Amino acid sequence: MKRVLVLNGPNLNLLGTREPGIYGTTTLAQINAKLTKLAEDAGVKLDTYQSNIEGELINRIHAAAADNTAFIIINPAGYTHTSVAIRDALSAVKIPAIEVHLSNIHTREAFRSHSYISGVALGVIAGFGPQSYELALQYALHRLASQDAKSG
Ligand code: DQA
């Protein structure tokens, strides 16, 4: 079964109560449940992982290379704007990655406009709340289905 990994960075475990005016009231568990169902319906296994620790996110990216993950959907959260190391991990494993953000990082503080991750991502989806993840997954599922059609 094809696998997609959804990775979430620091403070996203607090979704639901964290700055609801910016990030909404949906919890990470609710987002992950919805994504799991969408993937399952398409015959794809969804793995989810959240960490507040940069090195743990990097280790999980490395592990994805070993378990044949076909796509990574990543919200690097605050590490978006600081982490050369997460960018390097994504480059190293060469798994297509889609960067997502709940908020539109380009309409907020200037420091949020720069992402270290975008340069190695297939694309970026920002500003649509929990739907940012769903749009990214929709794209990944579409790509996986068209790969199947070509190989099958
Ligand atoms: C975020 C945007 C980041 O700037 C911020 O540090 C986050 C969440 C988002 O999903 O909108 O933690 O990635």
Image (tube, rainbow, N blue to C red):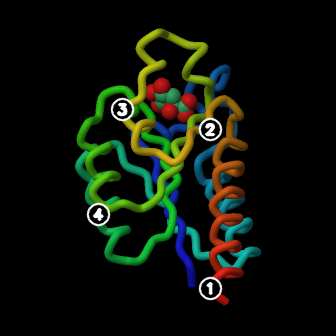
- In this orientation, which residue lies closer to the viewer: 82 or 91? 91
Mark 1 and 2 residues: CB-CB less than 8 Å, in contact? no
Between disc 2 and disc 3, whose residue precedes?
A: 3
Question: Of the numbered discs in the image, which one, if any, rests on residue 62?
Answer: 4
Callout 1 amino acid: Ser
> Quadrant location of residue 141?
bottom right
Location of residue 103 with respect to 112 vertically, above or below:
below
The residue under label 2 is 125
The residue under label 3 is 116
Q: Ligand 1 within 8 A of label 2's CB?
A: no
User: Left or right: 51 with respect to 103?
Assistant: left
Disc 3 is placed on an element classified as loop
- In this orientation, which residue lies closer to the viewer: 89 or 122? 122
* Whole-percent x, y for residue 143 in the image: 65, 65
Q: Give the residue at x 51% y 38%.
A: 14
Q: Give the residue at x 59% y 32%.
A: 17
User: Left or right: 29 with respect to 51?
Assistant: right
Between disc 4 and disc 1, whose residue precedes?
A: 4
Mark 4 and 1 residues: CB-CB less than 8 Å, in contact? no
